[in-house]
Every structure is written in structure tokens, then in C-alpha cells.
Image: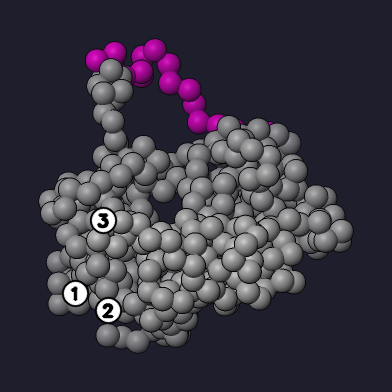
Amino acid sequence: MAKTARKTNASTRPPRAALQGHFRTLRLPSPLQPRIDALAKTEDWYTWAGYKAPLSLWDEELEYFTIRSQAAAFDISPMVKYRIEGADAEAFCNRVTLRDVSKLKPGRVHYTAWCDDAGHVLDDGTLFRLAPTHFRLCCQERHLPWLLDSTIGFDVMVEEETEAVAGLALQGPTSLAVLRDAGFAGVEKLKIFDLAEFPHESGMVAISRTGFTGDLGYELFVPAKLALSLWDRLFEVGRLHGIRAIGYTALNRARIEAGLIVANADFVTAEHAIRGDRLRLPDEIGLGFMVDAEKPHFNGRRTILAARANRSMKHVLVGLEIEGNIPAEHAIVYHRQKREVGLVSAAIWSPMAKRNIAIASLSRPYGDTVTDDLWVEIYAMRELKYERLMKRARIVPRPFIKLERRTANPPANV
């Protein structure tokens, strides 16, 4: 049977004044907020899942280069996290997500997605198998009601643990050296998508070799009460390895180079889509590789497989290389400079690839069987006047850059 967390009764409910104070808080503080605030020079903030989070902290350009040349620390505590535990935890995860969870062994992580019954993507994220019957699902959006409804018939407990568990991404070529010098013995043995627990003060920190940058990197999860001491432990030894805190703008540049997508940025999730033509099947946003047609039934299976058989998919997500050096973010894509065929969702001039790159959603057959004579429409500010530029674009594979150190085993000890 499904199990959920015990409801708060009158004796344990916070006083009214505390509740009123909560609603006066426009942005929730992360467990790492004191350290982030102390480093914030630009005061450049945004709201991430209700939390106060930095777009930049000191210099968004240099923060990007910290990822690629040093060790960049990024607070991922606001990322939505769910604890899934119980005798049927594996069967439950296998039922709601696209990949075959029976192949995910304890101490491993995989990137996955989940769909509604019509096969439209609700979200993507990472599934951590902490133990045979204990999983952690991390994602962009909140799905607790849907997950709880899905537990019917399963002996499993699903509980959101976003506030209880702090997260910190440590990315870049010297990230391993920081963890090694911080005393996490054996962390160098972690292969890509491996997961292990290490002692930290009175508890444990779960460290996975994962990240959102396409670089060598790790993600650390720890009880919220130990978040500040973990930060201090890393930064005390990390100075010699160039550790710096970064904001989302730098991380976003790195993820575009890695060809990674973001929910409600590169595609609209099924629960957020207002118009029916905004919904996407996994194959339409480059997530078709996740679909395991051989495993037992999962949400959306019938529709996804029928669309493949009938070749009825309407969209395709592609990587573009665009002439010139002006980023084409949110530019319209044309065929032969006349027919509108899609939209760019993310674009940058890549310092690593030395190319003008973009991720775009196109209407089939464009991007599928028709790939020639594509153009993007860019409006560039020139001396207080916008000029319309039509730039040639060509479809290229993602990722746009591929760094050997991301998957090297063992990583270079720098």
C-alpha cells in the first residue's frame, strides 16, 4: 500500500506568527544561503523553485571559466528532491519513468524522464539508487501529487525532501583534487554516474560523479544541518585548486555547450503547457534514447511506440551552428529565408568550441529529412538601433564540445 509522511496535528503545527512570517518571505533561503550571500558582489538574483538563487555572484564571464579551468561550486539545494523507499520502490520507479530501473544498481545514477498517460513529457531528472529499496529522484518541477497518485497498488513511500537535503555541485578539472584534499578517501574510484557515501561530521554525505556542465564534476548531498560545515570543508582546502562559487548564468553556458536541455526552457512540460501543440513526446526533445520498449508497462508507452511506428512525431530538437558571433537566443528558424520552421530555445557564443551554437525545436520534416538551407533571424543592437540579420545555420551533433576528462577513469589528479 502507498505510504506518505504523517500529517502535522494541532500540537506540532507551527504558531500562527511563524506561518505568517513564512508568507512574508518572498524567496526561501537555501541551507547554504549565508555563504552565498557573503560572496554575492553583483546582487544578481532569481527565484528557483521558490528559493533565492544567484544568476551571478562576482562576474558571470569569469564564473564560466571557473567551470572549465578550476573548480566551480554551485548550490543545487533548491533542486526538487524526492525520497522513494519501500519493498516496491524499484517496480514503482520502473512504472513511472522511461528507463529500465531494474538495470540501475545500488550506487549508480541515471538520467531519465517521465510522461503522462498520453506520452507527453512531464519532466526530466536524475534517479539515484542509494540502496536496493531506496531511491532519490531529483528534478526541476514539483510532482508530489502525481507521484502519490501513482503509488496506488505499490508498497512504497514517496516524500519530498527538498528542504531536508542540501545539494552542492562541484564542477571542473580540479574538482577531484578538492574532494581528495578534503579527506573523502576513495572518491577518485567513482566512475561516471557512480554514487557513494562518505563520513562528514556526525552524518554522511552522498557524492555522485554527475553534473550539468559536460565537465569532470560531482554532486554532493548532505542533511541540511551539515550544509555549511561541508561548504567550509571544501573551501578551506579548495583555495589552492581555484575553487570559486558561481551562479546560474555560468552554469547555463556550460550546459548549452554540453547540449543538455532544461525543462520549461527548451521544452514545455505537460503540466505547464497551455496550448496542445506545445506538448512533446520524448523522441521530439532528444530523449528517445531513454525509452526502453522491452521493460514492463510504463506511463505513455502505448502512445510513444505508436508514434514511432506511424512516424507521426511532429517536432525534433536539434543542435545548430550559426554563422557569425551574435548569439541567436529565441530567434526564429526559417527554411530558405521564407518559411518559419522552428525556434531557438538556447544559444551562446561558445568559448570552448569557438562557435556560435544553439539548441532549437523544429517542425518536422525540417531537422529530420529536410536539413539544408536553414536560417535564423537575429535582431542585433547597433548604435541604438536594432538591425535584422539573417544568418545561415546548419544542424550539428550535440554535445557541441566533448571533454575527455568528464568520463576519464580515474580522472586526472590535478
The residue sitting at 65% across, 33% down in the picture is 149
- Residue 39 image position (x, y, % from top left): 14, 55
Q: Earlier in the sequence, mark 1 or mark 2?
A: 2
In the image, residue 185 sits, relative to residue 264, either above or below, namely below
The span from disc 3 to disc 2 (Cα, nearest Å) is: 36 Å
**Magenta segment: does it hold 395?**
no
- Residue 299 image position (x, y, % from top left): 73, 47
> 10 Å neighbourhood of mark 2: few (<14), some, or many (≥20)?
some
Disc ID at residue 69: 2
> 10 Å neighbourhood of mark 3: few (<14), some, or many (≥20)?
few
Disc ID at residue 384: 3
The residue sitting at 62% across, 42% down in the picture is 270
Q: Are marks 1 and 2 in contact (CB under 8 Å)?
A: yes
Q: Is residue 360 left or right of residue 99?
A: left
The type of residue carrying mark 2 is: Ser
The local secondary structure at tag 2 comes to helix
The local secondary structure at tag 1 comes to loop
Q: Earlier in the sequence, mark 3 or mark 2?
A: 2
The type of residue carrying mark 1 is: Gly
The span from disc 1 to disc 2 (Cα, nearest Å) is: 9 Å
In this rendering, which labeled residue sits more in front, label 1 or label 2? 2
- Residue 193 image position (x, y, % from top left): 50, 70
Placement of the C terminus among the 4 image quadrants: bottom left
In this rendering, which labeled residue sits more in front, label 3 or label 1? 3
The type of residue carrying mark 3 is: Leu
- Residue 184 image position (x, y, % from top left): 30, 71
The residue lying toward the viewer, choosing from 49 and 413, is 49
Disc ID at residue 242: 1
The residue lying toward the viewer, choosing from 77 and 214, is 214
Q: Are marks 3 and 2 in contact (CB under 8 Å)?
A: no
Where are the magenta residues, as a range?
A: 1-17
